[in-house]
Image: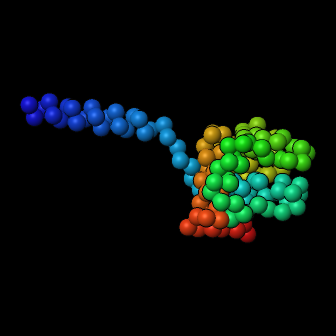
Amino acid sequence: MRMTKQLLMGAVLGIVMVGTAGAYDGDWKRGRVYYRQVCTDCHQSMAKKTISPNEKTKAEWTAYITADKHDATKKSNPSLKYATSRAYRDSIKTKNKAAEKFLEVPDAELQADIKAWVLYGAKDSDNPSRCQ
């Protein structure tokens, strides 16, 4: 009887672990590093300013990311997903060594990292932050 309970508990634990294994919440620190080292160059040359996380609320950032509209000027690819894609990083790696450093990071993870960073530092978060 005791062995049956142990096996049952092991099976339940295994199911719970498998169910959560695929979830990736994003690493706000890596998102901040990516933005500062990769995105800032383009933002300063095209938008003439960096964008700080505290410029929007969490809801505004979530809506912005979900809409996937990035460059309103249409001078570059208008998709936010493109700005975090391997194709984009590969296209700028000769000019930006940080892009080369992030080349092997899966696109979805990097996008989650950027989202985690802007939500972490959003206007209504516990840590409103500015780019420096």
* Number of on-image labels: 0
Residue 98 in view in this figure? yes
Quarter-of-image position of residue 56: bottom right
Percent from the top left, x then y, of residue 5? 15, 34
Vertical arrangement, residue 131 with respect to residue 41, above or below: below
The x and y percentages for residue 121 are 63, 63
In this view, the residue farthest toward the left is: 1
Residue placed at 63% from the left, 40% from the top?
108
Asked whether residue 93 is in view, the answer is no
In the rendered view, tell whether residue 17 sits above or below residue 54.
above
Residue at position x 68%, y 43% from top?
Answer: 66
For residue 115, side relative to residue 85 (left or right): left
Q: How is the image coloured?
A: rainbow
Q: Quadrant of the C terminus?
A: bottom right
Q: Position of residue 87 (x, y in %)?
A: 76, 37
Quarter where residue 12 is shown: top left
Where does the image place residue 35, in percent across and percent down from the top left? 71, 56
Horizontal side, residue 105 vs residue 25: left or right: right
Q: Nearer the viewer, residue 66 or 16?
A: 66
The residue located at (73%, 42%) in the rendering is 68
Location of the N terminus (image quadrant): top left
